[in-house]
Image: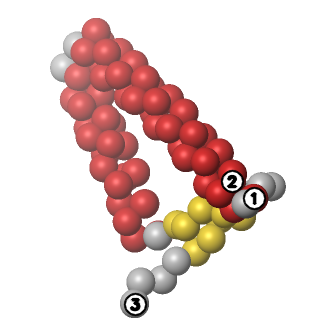
Amino acid sequence: MQSKILIVGTNRCLPFRPGVNISIAWIPAVITSTMCGDALGIEQYTVAIWVFGLTAVISLMGLLFYKKISRIAGEKNAE
């Protein structure tokens, strides 16, 4: 049996599986910090900026996707 925690906002409830969601979010952070740290360590500042910028763009896309899913889930819960 898999445990679920509901994240309750003002108008939505989304299932949250701690083991899965946190592990998935952790991987890009480790990769980004490793790549940026290595690039900064060998003074390749352009590479570090590109990695950081790409990570920021991907994070923004994920945030927009999350908001879209939250809105759809909120509409379904309202029905």
Report the disc number at residue 1: 3
Report the disc number at residue 78: 1
Residue under pointer 2: 74
Under circle 3, the secondary element is loop
Between 50 and 71, the one lying in front of the other is 71
Figure quadrant of the C terminus: bottom right
> Are circles 1 and 3 on residues that touch, CB within 8 Å?
no
Spatial CA distance of label 2 from label 3 is 26 Å
- Which mark is in front, 2 or 1? 1
Question: Picture quarter containing residue 45?
Answer: top left
> Are circles 2 and 1 on residues that touch, CB within 8 Å?
yes
Within 10 Å of the Cα at label 1, are there few (<14), some (14-19), or many (20+) other Cα atoms? few
Spatial CA distance of label 2 from label 1 is 6 Å
Asked whether the viewer can see residue 44, the reply is: yes
Within 10 Å of the Cα at label 2, are there few (<14), some (14-19), or many (20+) other Cα atoms? some
Give the residue at x 60% y 40%: 67
Under circle 1, the secondary element is helix
Instruction: Pick whichever of labels 1 and 3 is earlier in the sequence.
Output: 3
Left or right: where 16 falls relative to 36? right
Instruction: Pick whichever of labels 2 and 3 is earlier in the sequence.
Output: 3
Amino acid carrying label 1: it is: Ala
